Amino acid sequence: MATEDAYEELVSLDALADEGPLVERVGGHTVALFHHEGQVYAVDNRCPHMGFPLSKGTVDDGLLTCHWHHARFELARGDTLDPWADDVQTFPTEVRDGTVYVDPDPEPDVSPATHWRNRLADSLQENIDLVAAKAVINLDDLGEGFATPLATAVDFGTTYRADGWGRGLTTLGAMANLYDDVAHDERLRAMYVGVTEVADNCAGEPPRFDQYELSNDALSKDRLKSWFRETCEVRDSDGAERCLRTAAAVLPPEDVVEILLAAATDHLYLNASHTLDFVNKAVETLDHVGWDKAEDVLASLVESFTDAARAEERSEWRQPVDVATLCFDAHEALPDLVAAGEGRDWERPDGFVETLLSDDPEAIVDTMQEAVREGATAEQLARAVALAATRRVAQFATSNEFADWNTVHHTFSYANAAHALAARTDAVDAYRPCFDGAMSVYLDRFLNTPAAPLPDPGDSDRDPETIRGDLLAAFDEQGRVDEAGALVSEHFDAGGDVADLKRTLGEGLLREDAGFHELQNVEAAFRQHEFGTTDAERRLPLIATARYLAAHFPTRRAREQTFTIAHRLFRGEQIHGEA
């Protein structure tokens, strides 16, 4: 707060009363002065909503109304009646000998960091995208650009959606995983997308009412695992939550993952892949925010187990070939197969992935069982299935119905989740989604008929930066699916930096109104790329995701418009075009 001597002299009271409102510069601020009901008021002239000059607004009955979107502000302290607008900065005034003086440096009620944390919470509660964008941008500038939006949205999403973990929190976790692979501005967009997806997924939903963990903290992993699986089997969500909260409270993370994996694979391909993917994203999110939040985060998964659709109840898993029974028989044989492979080293033989892509489900299962018998780890087997699933996306035939892209995507996201979870536990249960995922790959075989050809590796003398520009241009027009895949392959041919290619794919993704599946697809592709051991394996996931994005882009880019407005306001630019 400025001392009396630090107040700046501005205008005569008579001039303000006769000519007001007036606009003046005070301590680096443009201030609107109002004379109302015998008092003098000073506010920042930029409306905090979208920058319209408040001097062009109307004052009545102690309220200042902005004429652009009709935001209302209490004139003395700047508080808004409209949460989407934010409070406006006010400046204390004094009248001395008929002259108006203004404090150029008022002391804020709260620190900027506290203000923007509060506004982030407001954006989630009110589902206001522009407020979320402003909060994310300003918190990043204050050094909280990743941790605060992520933790705040996780807490909100696990509290205010009765159905628990869904597309919003899954998107948030995927965006957190993408964070290090994209450029700075795309990091802000990623957090903005994650936060707004959580808000939208929770909007209009009743809150969760938590159960409590069991009081016996000496319960064993085996007992809690048995109880959790049984309560999920009979769709008892309250009992399942109490078991899972107890496990999260008393067991190490790898044991909790084992319990989740077992229950998620007692039935096949739960919720068309989403249950396993939700589990994976939940535990990956805990890696970011801390496992001290495990009880609440994992408890929010329960409905995705107890209310899940079960693939063995669907005709395509039973007819004309009963692949469901093949899976269950393979699950039953796993303990003996794993025991037989104990102490043996397995390397994926040539042609293994081709077998997984074949049209003989019994041969696929036999080949996988033999691999386990020869010492294949669950992580190795899941990686092979993920490669096969990636091929289905990379070679998706565009002659299929557009909605069929989702079918191959679901298998891909399921296989990626199975691979990630297998790295967290050595439990036999980690093998089960390998067989389920392989049967889903088999069921998708007609979507590669005819299979789109993969680009042949070769030489390119083009500048990689030019190729990346062409890739973004391909996303600007519908239907350039094969061209997008070819450009990714050419970027490899030209010796381009894969990190630059990922940043370009991230830019192409985050400037669009990308849907849940597009956001999932890129994040999973980036992860699978990291496990490539050959040039072909490293290319494949990025070719696949480029084709997938090209099939779904461009969009209206309404989300980008909102983010751009927030960024321009942060930089002090004029949106309305007037001072």
Image (cartoon, rainbow, N blue to C red):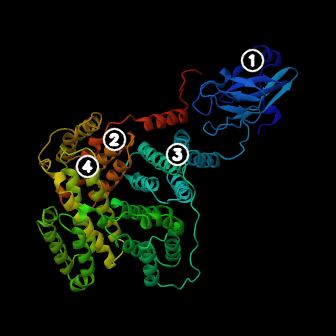
Q: Report the mark closest to the observer, 1 or 4.
A: 4
Q: Amino acid at mark 2?
A: Gly
Residue tagged by mark 1?
20
In the picture provided, is 203 more to the left or to the right than 481?
right
> Dot 2, how many residues are within 10 Å of its Cα: few (below 14), some (14-19), or many (20+)?
many
Sequence-wise first label, 3 or 2: 3
Query: To which quarter of the image does residue 99 belong?
Result: top right
Query: To which quarter of the image does residue 538 belong?
Result: bottom left
Tell me what residue is drawn at x 19 percent, y 55 percent.
391
For the question of whether residue 426 can be seen, the reply is yes
Q: Amino acid at mark 3?
A: Val
Q: Amino acid at mark 1?
A: Gly
Q: Report the mark closest to the observer, 4 or 2.
A: 4
Sequence-wise first label, 3 or 1: 1
Looking at this view, name the residue that lies furthest to the right. Answer: 97
Sequence-wise first label, 2 or 1: 1
In the picture provided, is 370 more to the left or to the right than 409?
left
Q: CA distance from mark 3 to mark 1?
A: 36 Å
At numbered mark 4, what does the secondary structure look like: helix, strand or loop?
helix
In the displayed structure, would residue 323 be above or below residue 449?
A: below
Task: Count the numbered circles shown.
Answer: 4
For residue 171, the mark is none
Q: CA distance from mark 4 to mark 3?
A: 35 Å
Residue tagged by mark 4?
404
For the question of whether residue 301 can be seen, the reply is no
At numbered mark 3, what does the secondary structure look like: helix, strand or loop?
helix
Tell me what residue is drawn at x 49 percent, y 73 percent.
240
Q: CA distance from mark 4 to mark 2?
A: 22 Å
Tell me what residue is drawn at x 43 percent, y 37 percent.
560
For residue 136, the mark is 3
Residue tagged by mark 2?
508
Q: Provide residue 218's location: percent of width, then percent of height.
A: 53, 86
